[in-house]
Image (cartoon, helix red, strand yellow):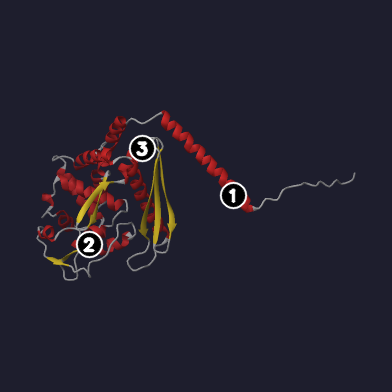
Amino acid sequence: MSDEKKVIEAEVVPEAALSVRDNATLVALERATIDQQVATAKAYPRSVEQFKQDVMSMATLDQETAESMSYQLPRDGKLIEGPSIRLAEIAGSCWGNVRYASEVIEVGDEYLVAQGRCHDLQRNVDIALRVRRRIVNKYGKRFGTDMISITGAAACSIALRNAILKVVPMAYVKPVLEAAKRVAAGDEKTLAARRDAALLWFKDKGVKAEWVFGLLGVKGKEDIALSHIAQLGGIRNAIKEGEATVQEFFEPFMPGGSGHATVGGVVSVDSLKATGVKVETASAANVPQTTASAATPPATDTAKASPSPAPPDGAAKKADSLFG
């Protein structure tokens, strides 16, 4: 039996051509997916009244959920407040007929950039917003891989929140935010327990009670009112979500070189004097420069805050259950 040789003819396709062909296929599939989603959104339009009912019930489901609906940040000598990423996620889910996502699109030597996108399929409104965050510490040293990932995740959350809240009208979000703040504050019956839980949560972060009193402009624990509980909840959320650091909020109340509290712009001098602490006003040249990001490693914050010994596990769990 003679051996038979088989000759197979094949076309040699350059790798670049395959890549272009694959990309064209992906683009076509994505376009078809969006077209189908738009058609579905047009066929089943949202009900604004239903949205308002759903988002309100979810945001105020319980005290812990309500506490996570807002954040506060130190800016230009005062605390600014806004809806958190948790509220944006609820609003996006209840709004319906939307696509949203976020991702890190650039990592440089000193900064990374995240982009959040939200597309209202029913109204054909497509918003894409970018957020930049530092990935170097105050000494100019670049973060490690894990800290860059944490910073990127925080930047993605912020970018996503900003995009969603550009699509979902704030006129519908603001009443929900105010209702959540009222639920989060609780009532006079629970005020004492929530004061203790709030102070315990900050103590676990290395924050002394006196610094909290200074930030709120009160003289002691008994002066903390329901409105302050909601305010502390917003500060906690900003720290947890990486929008600000412990140091940004409380550095003005940490011991300075002279043994006095140095005001760096979080609150007014008058509000700090109300606590009975002597005040030294820092010059512009000596005011530390900080950024609202997850860029400062937690170790730096706790080192500067001279934390007290960690509370027992049982006490920490109680603070989490009461204060979120």
Q: Amino acid at mark 2?
A: Glu
Q: Amino acid at mark 3?
A: Ser
Q: Identify the residue shown where x is 27% and y is 49%.
A: 237
**Residue 66 x, y percent position in the rendering:** 25, 41
What residue is shown with label 2? 251
Q: Is residue 175 visible?
A: yes
Of residue 104 and residue 272, the one placed in the foreground of this image is 104
Assign a secondary structure to mark 3. helix
What residue is shown with label 3? 93
Q: Nearer the viewer, mark 2 or mark 1?
A: 1
Which is nearer the N-term, disc 3 or disc 1? 1
Furthest-top residue in this view: 43
Callout 3: few (<14), some (14-19), or many (20+) C-alpha neighbours within 10 Å? some
Q: How much space separates mark 3 and mark 1, taking CA atoms?
A: 35 Å
Q: Amino acid at mark 1?
A: Val
Assign a secondary structure to mark 1. helix
